[in-house]
Amino acid sequence: TGSPYITVAVKGANEYVVFDFELYDLLKELSLIKGNEYFSKFTKIFYAMFGILLFILSLALVVYAFVTTWEIVSYRSQDVLAGIFHSIIALTLALAIFDLSKTILEHEVFYKSISRNNNLENRLLARFFISIIIALSIESLMVVFKIALNDYSKMIYAFYLIAGVGVMMASLSLFIFVMRYSAKE
C-alpha cells in the first residue's frame, strides 16, 4: 500500500500469531504524534454542533410531515394531494439531512479515521451524493405527478429535473469508476 507498517509475531504453542499495525495510526493512537490539541477540540466541537443542528432540523421536518398528514386526515382537507406531496417532500429532505448529519457526526466527531489508504473521503462523498440523488429522484417523481394532475404544458420542467438527476448519476458512476481504477494502481 505504500504505508509503513509494523509487524509483530508472537509464538504460541504450535503456531505463530502475526499482527500488522499501520505505523501512522499506531503513533496517533499512542498520542506520540498529534496536531494542535486546542484546534482539534474546537474543530470537533464545531462539527458536533453542526451535526446536532442538522439532526434537529431533520427531526423538525419529520414532525412537520406528520403534522401536515394529520391535518389532512383530521380536517378532511380539499387539497389532499398537495398536502401529501408536502409531507413526502419534507420526509425526503429529512432523510437526506439526517444522513448528512449522521455522516458528519460519525466521521468527524465519534469515529474520526485518518487512515490514508481507505479512501474514506471519497466514500463519504459518494455516500452523500447517493443520498442527494435518492432525494432528488423522489422529488422528481413528485413533480411529475403534480404536473400531470395540474398542467401538462409544464412537463418539460419535470424532464429537466429528471435529466439533471440522470447527469448526477452518470457523474457519480464515473467518479466511483475513476476512484476504483486509481486505487488499483
Image: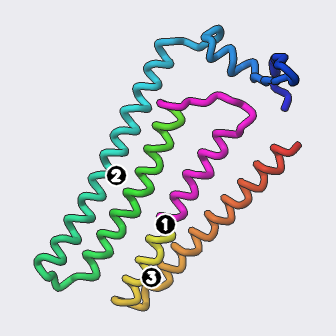
Separation (CA) of disc 2 from disc 3: 25 Å
Q: Secondary structure at mark 1?
A: helix
Q: Quadrant of residue 35?
A: top right
Q: Which mark is residue 136?
A: 1
Where in the figure is residue 109, as x and y percent of width and height?
Answer: 47, 30
Secondary element at image label 2: helix
Query: Where residue 177 sits in the image (x, y, percent)?
Result: 77, 56
10 Å crowding of disc 1: few (<14), some (14-19), many (20+): many
Task: For marks 3 and 1, give the CA distance.
Answer: 12 Å
Compared with 169, 35 (above or below) is above
- Asked if labels 2 and 1 touch by Cβ distance under 8 angstroms, the answer is no
Task: Name the residue type under label 2.
Answer: Ser
Residue assigned mark 2 = 58
Q: Is residue 167 left or right of residue 135?
A: right
123 magenta-colored? yes
Amino acid found under the numbered disc labelled 1: Leu
Instruction: Identify whether 60 is placed above or below 31.
Output: below
Q: Which residues are magenta?
A: 109-136
Horizontally, residue 135 falls left or right of residue 83, namely right
Q: Earlier in the sequence, mark 2 or mark 3?
A: 2
Q: Where, by quadrant of the figure, is residue 8 drawn?
A: top right
The C terminus sits in image quarter: top right
Which residue was labeled with disc 3?
A: 144
Residue 144 in picture, x, y percent from top left = 44, 82
Position of 166 with respect to 75 (left or right) is: right
Seen at 41% across and 50% down, the residue is 98
